[in-house]
Image: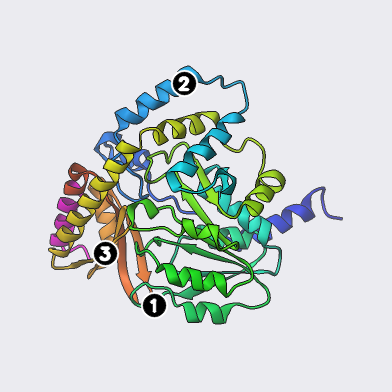
């Protein structure tokens, strides 16, 4: 006879074997300990965080929040206020917004709402790994259509991959890790020829030239996700939103979203940032300027090719072994992301666009590593 709980636990463990652990990459503290350095000596450029938003400015906002909030009380009216502020920032209706603990939590929520065991979720490759993870946890079949060689959507292949079991299409635009934004008409074409939900993760849209958030008004099966982790520099507070037709957002908010998913601290900080969009828009221009400089500098290195970007990170290809280069950079206190193969191209890496002192140190380290002939 099985021991108490053994059957249920075995099912969980069996499902877990189908999942890859989410790799957050090297941490500042962990690398500092290994290298016997101070954390301040480590340059972290692997998670696309926004270091252009002044830290003193964010700390001053948090001090204001601490003085204003009563942490003993659940956030209620504050979420309504945040929806109203976001509606002005994105030119949508407050009724079209759902607030969540980062866009990841809302993407997970949507997969739980739309997918059951045996259903299909359709996406692209390469892209953000969280989509496959969320779909697989639901017991759904995850199908990924390769991007074209120029990183654009293969709309014809995606449409032909839709079956009666396909309930959800998941896209990241601009896409991680390829850093390009997909053509608006391609996303519209997918939505207009699909009966399920097309969910577009626009975590990096503020660094690009456009958005499909306005299409929510006319395309009822389109949902768009935004986050405060990137452009607003609040990755540590975990806050995001979904924009979709009011009927869907009402159902999600009232029937499926858990109560009080976000902290009053995060909501209040977001409200104050939305009152200072002048600073946020200035940092966007700084990111774009440094992004252009970084692409140019990388492409001046003989063994490197950097791709164009509409995000706050750069995808680049090296002619040598990217894993060895990654490890050699770690030894110099510089953390980037080793991507490996992208479609038919191996040895790809990703680096966050950061203020010049950080980027200059990264470039110096990369040139040293390449000159040392590590691969």
Q: Position of residue 281 (x, y in %)?
A: 31, 43
Q: Secondary structure at mark 3?
A: loop
Q: Which residues are magenta?
A: 361-375
Q: For this rendering, which residue is in front, 220 or 152? A: 220
Rendering quarter of residue 298: bottom left
Q: Is residue 367 left or right of residue 133?
A: left
Name the mark on residue 308: 3
- Which label number is shown at residue 148? 1
Side of 206 relative to 80 (left or right): left
Percent position of residue 97, x then y: 56, 46
Q: Residue at x 51, y 33 (%)?
A: 267
Among all residues in the image, which is located at the extreme right?
Answer: 1
SS majority, magenta: helix
Is 45 covered by the magenta stretch? Answer: no
Q: CA distance from mark 2 to mark 1?
A: 49 Å
Q: Which residue is mark 2?
A: 66
Q: Tag 2, which secondary structure?
A: helix
How would you rate the neighbour count of disc 1 (Cα within 10 Å): few for under 14, some for 14-19, many for 20 or more? few
Q: Secondary structure at mark 1?
A: loop
Among the 4 quarters of the image, the one containing residue 72: top right
Q: Is residue 20 visible?
A: no
Asked if labels 3 and 1 touch by Cβ distance under 8 angstroms, the answer is no
Q: Residue at x 33, y 40 (%)?
A: 280
């Amino acid at each position: 006879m099985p021991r108490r709980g053994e059957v249920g636990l075995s099912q969980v463990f069996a499902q877990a074997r189908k999942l890859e652990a989410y790799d957050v990459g090297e941490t500042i503290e962990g690398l500092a300990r290994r290298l016997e350095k101070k954390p301040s000596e480590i340059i972290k450029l692997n998670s696309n965080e926004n270091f252009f938003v002044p830290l003193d400015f964010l700390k001053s906002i948090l001090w204001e929040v601490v003085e204003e909030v009563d942490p003993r009380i659940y956030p209620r009216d504050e979420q309504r206020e945040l929806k109203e502020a976001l509606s002005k920032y994105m030119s949508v209706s407050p009724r079209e917004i759902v607030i969540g603990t980062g866009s990841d939590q809302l993407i997970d929520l949507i997969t739980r709402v739309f997918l059951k065991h045996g259903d299909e979720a359709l996406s692209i490759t390469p892209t953000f790994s969280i989509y496959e993870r969320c779909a697989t946890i639901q017991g759904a079949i995850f199908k990924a259509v390769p991007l074209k060689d120029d990183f654009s959507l293969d709309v014809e292949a995606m449409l032909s991959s839709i079956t009666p079991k396909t309930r959800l299409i998941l896209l990241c635009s601009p896409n991680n890790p390829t850093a390009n934004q997909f053509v608006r008409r391609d996303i519209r074409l997918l939505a207009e020829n699909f009966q399920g939900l097309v969910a577009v993760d626009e975590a990096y849209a503020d660094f690009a030239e456009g958005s499909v958030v306005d299409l929510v008004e006319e395309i009822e099966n389109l949902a768009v996700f935004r986050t405060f982790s990137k452009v607003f520099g609040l990755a540590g507070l975990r806050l995001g939103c979904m924009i979709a037709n009011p009927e869907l957002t009402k159902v999600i908010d009232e029937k499926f979203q858990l109560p009080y998913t976000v902290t009053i601290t995060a909501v209040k900080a977001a409200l104050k940032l939305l009152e200072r969009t002048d600073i946020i828009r200035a940092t966007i221009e700084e990111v774009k300027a440094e992004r252009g400089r970084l692409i140019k500098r990388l492409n001046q290195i003989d063994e490197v090719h950097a791709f164009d970007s509409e995000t706050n990170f750069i995808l680049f290809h090296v002619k040598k072994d990217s894993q060895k280069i990654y490890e050699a950079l770690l030894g110099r206190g510089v953390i980037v992301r080793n991507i490996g193969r992208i479609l038919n191209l191996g040895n790809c890496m990703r680096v966050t666009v950061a203020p010049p002192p950080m980027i200059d140190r990264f470039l110096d380290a990369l040139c040293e590593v390449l000159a040392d002939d590590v691969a």
